[in-house]
Image (spheres, rainbow, N blue to C red):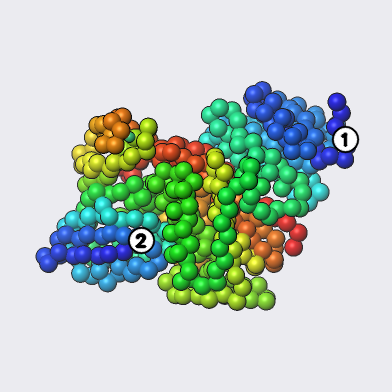
Amino acid sequence: MNVALSADGRALTLSGPLSEKDDLTRLAAQLSGEVRVDVGGVGRINSAGVKGWMSFVAALPDSVQLVFERCPAGFVSQLNMVAGFIGKGRVASVAVPYTCPSCGESADPIVSVSPLRDLPATHGPCPRCGAMLELDVSPDEFLAFLQG
Amino acid sequence: MTASPLLKQVLFVSASEALRQFGDRVLRSAGLAVTSAPSAAAARESLAARRADLVVVDLADAPQEASGAMVDLLGQLREESPSPQGPRLLALVRVRSADHFRALFSKRRITNFLAVGEDETLEPRELAVTAQKLVSRQLFGLSRYLGGSPRLETMELDRSEQKDAVVDRAEAFAVEAGCHPRVAQQIAIAVDELVTNALYNAPVDVKGAALYAHLPRSTPVKLDQRIVIQLASDPHRVAISALDPFGSLLPDIVMDYLSRCFAERSPLMSPQRGGAGLGLYYLFNLLHSFIIDLEPGHATESIGLLDISKSYRAYAARGRSFNLFVGPP
Ligand SMILES: [Zn+2]
């Protein structure tokens, strides 16, 4: 996983796969206050990566509040599957999966979830074939993490 | 026409007439003798009159905590026939909630269940293979779950450094098979979990003591023997498997891990228990069917089956099946 922290320590960008190779516990000590975390580029997440991630979350100083932005579907799956995945953090926005039913083209528009809005069933015409892109998740299941 | 008494006997219990007819047709085609019963009471009558090698019980929409007639039947059969000579049990399930799965793994201790689709059918080949495996001792093999002449790739590895290449190949394979890229990524993660389990959790010494389970998964390992990873597909399904030469997985531990993961939904529980628990939980969630073939002390084959889904939504909405088969040691 690639980690980029801004000079003022208030913006963190994570990208690439989250796996057993990632030890983020030292990063935890470098953070303070509210930190915006862009996870839009995070790819595959395996269970060993989740274990390491939970250690990172547990090591965060009390003063830190992480605000997650552009959470991709794989990250949202963890939010729904693993209790306490972001600790005391909160999710500001998610990348909502849409797929073209006729050619399979994908789009992942960013939707703010604070406050929560309904996920539209369609997302404009497909750039490749013109059909309407359809929501590629069940809204209730995708946003289940918001229910606490 | 009366079936030969030499054939393995299946009692198929379901309140759904459509499903009974489907089960009858598929299981007869698989070379099994089938009797159907529309209720738990009729099933008990049938069992009093003739033996069954396998009882298939449709739990329908029974909520996980409620005790319905079918749930009671399954519980009674499990209590009465703990010996290898008693009938084997297969549950059919339609509910997909975490609470329901937790009840199946813990309270009900169901080691074999298949998901019924909204069209009142099951994947016919999977039903046939599952029933055959339950009544026979021939457990291993990935291709039997697929039709025609499936596309098959076999990779052998003995070092953790080889994992990434296998996982990348699995993702590309799934896309080539027709899966949506979002689904292919899930398949890649499942292969990652299978390989990690085979490399770190499976290896044991001659006395059966775990060799690497205690190691962080970032610590490289090199095995004395090879594990075999297979990727396969037909026009409808993708199958993945990992075969290790250890056979060290314990059925009770598998059931405990899965029930606890569904109960706690947390990877921080008891780190002493090693990584297998969370990996199994991920595999169950990632796959449409998660199958474990275990020959204690000899080999473990973990198989994953997934429908080729053109959308992530279809992939996620599919019911989940689980089958743990234990052969002779
Ligand atoms: Zn299109």
Residue B181 spot, x, y in % from top left: 39, 47
The verdict on label 2 being within 8 Å of ligand 1 is no
- Residue tagged 1: B4
The residue to which callout 2 is attached is A18
Whether residue B250 is visible, yes or no, is: no
The amino acid type of the residue labelled 2 equals: Leu
Q: In which quarter of the image is ligand 1?
A: top left
Label 1 is placed on what type of residue?
Ser
* Relative to B99, A44 lies left or right: left
How many numbered marks appear? 2
Count residues near mark 2 (Cα–Cα under 10 Å), then give few for <14, some for 14-19, many for 20+: many
Outermost residue toward the left? A8
Decide: marks 2, 1 in contact (CB < 8 A)? Answer: no
For the residue labelled by badge 1, is the local secondary structure a helix, a strand or a loop? loop
Q: Identify the residue at horizontal 58%, vertical 53% (top origin).
A: B152
Extreme residue in the top direction: B17
Coordinates of residue B138 in the picture (x, y in percent): 74, 53
Residue B54 in percent (x, y) is at 75, 41
Badge 2 and badge 1 in a common chain: no
Q: Disc 2 and disc 1: Cα gap in Å?
A: 56 Å
Name the one closer to the observer, B59 or A45.
Answer: A45
Q: Please determine whether, in this image, residue B324 is positioned above or below residue B307.
A: below
Which is nearer the eye, A51 or B286?
B286
Residue A103 x %, y %:
37, 36
* Viewport quadrant of the N terminus of chain B: top right
Chain designation of label 1: B
